[in-house]
Image: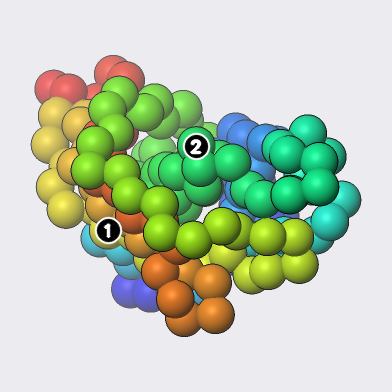
Amino acid sequence: MIISLNKDQILEYQKNRDPYLFVDFVSELSPGKFANGYKNLSLNEWFFKVHWPGDENMPGMLQIEALVQLCALTILCLDNNKGKVVYLTNVDRVRFFEKVLPGEKFEMKTKLLDFKRGVGICSGEAFVKNKIVCKANFKLFLPNNWL
């Protein structure tokens, strides 16, 4: 089953709220498998004002956070997980390739490679204008789901 989620629907599934929600729309999501979506980056984003004036760009760790939030939805859309908290426990193989600038569409593709006993093994990539800007592998943890 492939679903899409608008911002209001995303808010039903996960607990992040503006200004710390980094997913505007989920274009394709297969629960327990993958999620694709995006964040439109306006000049008014709070982080552009402070990271670095005169050379504004999206901080790398917020790029990773966006990938994590999107991939967490693959877990939260599984039966009985709606509205639960998913924790990030590990990030590795992080690579940044290009600056992400105001006005750009930050497009993401994430995969839930394995999910057992509450631990998800994940990967994600982000693109701007079809050019990769970052990628990472990470682990997510859904508490009280390890039995």
Disc number placed over residue 111 in the picture, else none? 1
Tell me the element at label 2.
Answer: helix
- Classify residue 48 as left or right of residue 142: right
- Classify residue 47 as left or right of residue 129: right
Q: In 3D space, how far apart are the residues under numbered discs 2 and 1 (Cα atoms)? A: 19 Å
Quarter of the picture containing the C terminus is top left
Residue drawn at x 71%, y 37% as measured from the top left: 51
Residue drawn at x 67%, y 50% as measured from the top left: 57
Give the x, y percent position of residue 107.
52, 68
Q: Residue furthest right?
A: 44
Give the x, y percent position of residue 70.
46, 52
Task: Determine which residue is flagged by label 2.
Answer: 61
Going by the numbered disc 2, the residue's amino acid type is: Met
> Residue 18 appears in which quarter of the rendering?
top right
Q: How many circles with numbers are drawn on the protein?
A: 2
Give the x, y percent position of residue 53.
81, 41
Residue drawn at x 40%, y 38% as measured from the top left: 81
Residue drawn at x 87%, y 51% as measured from the top left: 44
Whether residue 74 is visible, yes or no, is no
> Residue 99 appears in which quarter of the rendering?
bottom right
Of 83 and 135, nearer the camera is 135
